[in-house]
Amino acid sequence: MRLVLSALLWPGLLAGCIWLTHLGIQADRTVLVFNLTYFGLAALLLLLERVMPHERAWQRSDGQLPADLLHTVLNKSVVQVMVVMGAALGISEAVSPDGGASWPTAWPLWAQVLLGLIIAEFGFYWAHRLKHEWAPLWPYHAVHHSVTRLWIVNTGRFHFGDTLLAIAFSQPLLFLAGAPGPIFLYVASITAFCGLLTHCNVEMRCGPLNRIFNTPETHRWHHSPDLAEGNRNYGENFLLWDQLFRTWFCPAGRRPPAAIGIREAMPRGFLGQLAAPFVWRRLQARPALPLMPRIPQGLEAAE
Ligand SMILES: [Zn+2]
């Protein structure tokens, strides 16, 4: 029974959330229905994290609850400010409700949503990959990877600079492709649901779906402190670009590590984490604040 449930949960929950959001968008009640669905999914996953956890050790508090929540709220505010600025600059009005000339408006809606996801995913992939593999950007993304456990509350734990980068890479591509307004809504909603699901500490077995989608199983490998395993699976929703650029990783028969985190110094407090990317070198040389636990130094050999 538990095995069947662990196989059905990921596709079932994602499909259910997408269906509810679809009804909300069609009924012009997007914000209300999306929020109800999002917080409903979060509540259900919190419950499932207690009942059928993937990693029991991740149920213990890491003292990061306030920081996780404050980063989440700040990110939400940053996105809101971007939307308001977009409106002020006339960008949001430029997104036609019916799509630009280059957009295949005659396609069925599901195919248009799929196309929107694949286009946005190209930006998500490269933003995420650069944040890992181009040293100047890593300090921003390190805030997210400094967690020592995965659970739904650290889904939104991103430095606001990290969030701005992901938006800057993904949204203009959709805009240039002439995606209609509703496609932006579908892509944003599906990305939000996938984010909760990939970070949750619920036992889910996704089998062959791991090859195509960013699932809890593939994303746990992404949080491995061994860079040969962690600098993989950069996709936000799909792993298609990971397949194409050969960064997909999900070995059969192996379990991702329970000991996750980063090797660099990261302050334990929210304000210290916000400042960290701007004082990164000094922070590494002479950390003056209480720090997050670091992963064992021996793993550096794997780099
Ligand atoms: Zn990452």
Image (cartoon, rainbow, N blue to C red):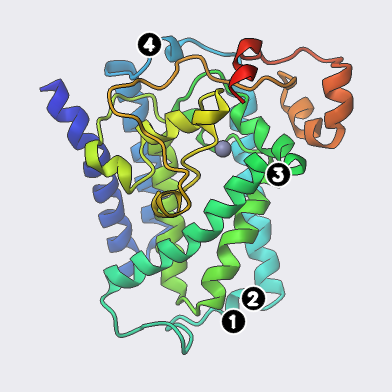
Residue beneath the point at 70% across and 44% down: 134
Q: Which image quarter has ligand 1?
A: top right
Secondary structure, mark 2, is helix
Foreground mark, 3 or 1, reads 3
Do residues under tags 3 and 1 come within 8 Å of each other at their CB atoms?
Answer: no
Instruction: State the residue in front, 56 or 152.
Output: 56
- Residue 94 bears which disc, if any? 1
In the image, is 13 to the left or to the right of 219?
Answer: left
The image position of residue 71, as x and y in percent, is 64, 35
Secondary structure, mark 4, is helix
| Image quarter hosting the N terminus | top left
Distance between the alpha carbons at the discs numbered 3 and 1: 33 Å
Tell me which amino acid carries mark 3: Trp
Q: With respect to residue 13, does 122 lie above or below?
A: below
| Image quarter hosting the C terminus | top right
Sequence order check, earlier mark of 4 and 1: 4
Residue beneath the point at 54% across and 54% down: 124
Secondary structure, mark 3, is loop
Does residue 204 appear in the picture of this structure?
yes
Instruction: State the residue in front, 184 or 208.
Output: 208
Mark 4, other Cα within 10 Å: few <14 / some 14–19 / many ≥20 = few
- Residue 56 bears which disc, if any? 4
Which residue in the protein does label 2 denote?
Answer: 91
Do residues under tags 1 and 2 come within 8 Å of each other at their CB atoms?
Answer: yes
Tell me which amino acid carries mark 2: Ile
Sequence order check, earlier mark of 2 and 3: 2
Q: With respect to residue 83, does 153 lie above or below?
A: above
- Residue 134 bears which disc, if any? 3
